[in-house]
Image (tube, helix red, strand yellow):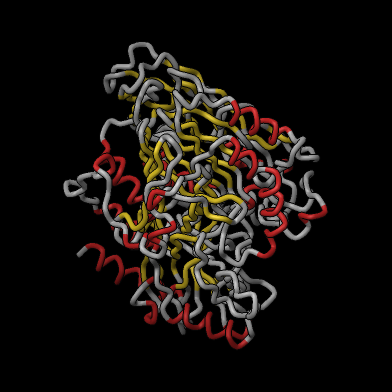
Amino acid sequence: MNMILLFFFLSLISQVRSEPILTVNPKTLSKSGDSVHIQWFGIESPSKLDWLGLYSPPDSPHHNFIGYKFLSSSSSTWESGAGSISLPLTFLRSNYTFRIFRWTESEVNPEIHDQDHNPLPGTKHLLAESETVGFELGRGPEQIHLALTGREGEMRVMFVAEDPEERQVRYGEKEGEWEGDVAVARVGRYEREDMCHAPANESVGWRDPGWIFDAVMSGLKGGVKYYYQVGSESKGWSTTRSFVSWDKSSNETIAFLFGDMGTATPYLTFSRTQDESISTIKWILRDLEALGDKPTFISHIGDISYARGYSWLWDEFFNLIEPVASKVPYHVCIGNHEYDWPSQPWKPDWANSIYGTDGGGECGVPYSLRFNMPGNSSEPTGTHAPATRNLYYSFDMGPVHFVYMSTETNFLQGSSQFDFLKHDLESVDRMKTPFVVVQGHRPMYTTSFESRDAPLREKMLEHLEPLFVKNNVNLALWGHVHRYERFCPLKNFTCGSMGQKGKDWEALPVHVVIGMAGQDWQPTWEPRPDHPHDPVYPQPKRSLYRTGEFGYTRLIATKEKLTLSFVGNHDGEVHDMVEILASGQVLNGGDDNHGKVGAVHKVDDVTRYSFSHYVWGGSVLVLGGFVGYVLGFVSHARRQIATERGWTSLKTEER
C-alpha cells in the first residue's frame, strides 16, 4: 500500500513540475549482484525508443554508458509515462547513476552501432537523471577465483579490491578456525596506458580495474576440504568459501572443460554478451554439488570474457564464475579475443588474415594480470605494456597430464613454446600419468567454414601434429569454433584403425572442438567443393559427432580409462561420449559406428551422478529471468531498421 501511495504521490509531483522524475532504491547495495529498483514518472508522449542508461562513474559523458535498457521492453506500464525496473549491479569501484533519454527513429545514425551492426541509442535528449547508487564499505573483496600452482600442498587464490591496502587469505580445516594459517597477498594492477588501442584505452571502454590480489595457501594436506576467507580486519572479510585440496596421489581425475563462454549482462551494451554462459555455469555448479568433496578443476580454453576492450565486462565475467571459481581451480589459456591486435609482435606473412583486432586493444593485459597460471611463460608485447603471461604450461592431476598452449603466439619449430611442448611431452611418465590431454584455442581440425584460419591450421599440422602423434597424445581439445565436434583418432585427416572386428588398432590423438560454452556467433559448415557458395557440407567420416548445441565437457579418468562426455545445456544430459584406454585404444565412436555416436546417452558408473537432490534456488531463476530479456517492440523495431538499411543483426562467421 505504501508503494502505491508513493507511486501516486510522485506521479502528481511530476505532473505539477512537468518534468520526468527518476528514482532509485536502495541508495546503497551490499555486494555485487544485489539489485536496485528504478522508477520513472512523468514522461510525456512516451516513445518506444526511450531508453535508460547505466553510468559508472556517475560523471561519465552521456555516450560513455555501461549499458542500456529500452523502457518499452522493461516495464508494462511504459505507455503511461511511468514504470519501474530492477537491475542487479556489479561493483565497479565507483558509484552508479541512471539517465533516461528520448531517441527517435529519425535520429538513427548507421555509423554508430554495436557489434551486430544494430544502431546504438542516441543521447541528444536527456529527460531525467537519478541520484547515485553505491556499495557498502567493509564487505570484503570480490571476484574470488582459485588456481593450482603446480606444486603439491598449495592453492592459489586471486581477488579484486578497490584499494591496495594489505589483504590476506586465512584458511583452515574447520570453518571459522583459522589456526594461524594466514598468507599475505601480493597486489598489482594495470593502467589505461598499458592498453594498446581503443576501445580499451579510451574513456568509452576504460574503467578502473581495481587492485588485483594474489595469495598462495601452502602446507595443505592432499584431498582435504579447507575453508578460507580473503580480506583484512580494517577493510572487511569475504564470506567463507571452501575447496578440496589437490591430491597428487589420487587415482582419479575429474575436470570440466570448455571454450568461448563469455559472460551475460542484464543490459545491452557496445559488445555482444553471452546469455548462454549462465546455463553453462548452472549445470557445472550442479555437477560440483553432486561430486561433494572430490578434487576437480575447470578448464576454459580461450575467449574468456569477450570484454574486447570494454573493461566492465571482465568484472561481470568474474562475478558470473565466482560461485564455481571460488570452489575449484579455474584454469585458462589465451584466445584471440584476449590478445589479438595488429601491433602484436608475432604476425608472420602467412597470418595476415588471421590475427586481427579481436582483442579490442587489450593486447593480453587484463588476461595476463587477472589470472596466474603455473609456470612462467611470457612474451614481450613490443610496446610499453607488460609482457603477456599464461601462454603455455602443464601440470599433473591424478592419472592425467594436462598441457596448455597458445595458438596466438609463436608455436613453430625453433620457438620457445615449441621447445616447451616438445620437452614437456617427451618427459611425461606414462606409468604415473597414462593420459595426456593438450589444450589450445584455435583448432587443428574443424569442419566449420573457417577459411581465414586455414593457414594457421596448416602450420599446426606441420609443426605440432607430428609432435602429438609421436608422443601419444590422447586428447587434443580446442575452442574458437562455437560448436561441439568430435573426430576419430586422426593423423593427417585420416582416421586410424579402432581395432574393431579383430583389426589392429593405432594410438592417435582424438581431436575435440569444445567452443560451445556461450558465444552464439556460429560459423557455417564447410561448403561442398563443387558448390563453394553453398555451406551444406555432408559430415565427413572423420567427424563423428557435431552439434550447434551449447554445453560443456566432463572428463573423468582412472589409471585404466578416460571418459570425455559432452553435456548439453538445454537439458543437462550427456549427448556424446568417447572412452580411451590407458593403452591409447579408443573404445567407442569409431569407424564401425559412424553416425550412431550421437545417440550415446549411457553414462559410465564413474560418471553417473545423482542430481535428484539438487534443486536450484530462486536466485538462479531470477538471474536467468532478467538476463533472458525480451526487447519486444524495440527488438522488432531495431531488426526492421536494420533490414531496411541492409544491416546484419547476427554475425555468422567466427573472428
The answer to which image quadrant residue 190 occupies is top right
> Which part of the image, by quadrant, shows the N terminus?
bottom left
Q: Does residue 390 sit above or below 547 in this rendering?
A: above
Q: Position of residue 169 (x, y in %)?
A: 43, 22
* Closer to the camera in the image, 284 or 161: 284
**Residue furthest out toward the bottom:** 644
The answer to which image quadrant residue 88 occupies is bottom left
Q: Position of residue 94 (x, y in %)?
A: 53, 45
Question: Is 304 displayed left or right of 321 in the figure?
Answer: right
Note whether residue 261 is visible: no
How many marks on residues? 0
Q: Residue at x 32, y 45 (%)?
A: 285
Note whether residue 331 is visible: yes
**Residue furthest out toward the left:** 613
Question: Is 557 displayed left or right of 429 in the figure?
Answer: left
* Closer to the camera in the image, 71 or 571: 571
Q: Position of residue 297 (x, y in %)?
A: 41, 36
**Residue furthest out toward the top:** 180
Question: Is 582 displayed left or right of 539 in the figure?
Answer: left
* Closer to the camera in the image, 437 or 209: 437
Q: Residue at x 60, y 37 (%)?
A: 470
Q: Does residue 86 sit above or below 404 in this rendering?
A: below
> Which part of the image, by quadrant, shows the C terminus?
bottom right
**Residue furthest out toward the front:** 502
Q: Position of residue 516 (x, y in %)?
A: 47, 57
Q: Does residue 422 sit above or below 268 in this rendering?
A: above
Q: Residue at x 68, y 46 (%)?
A: 408
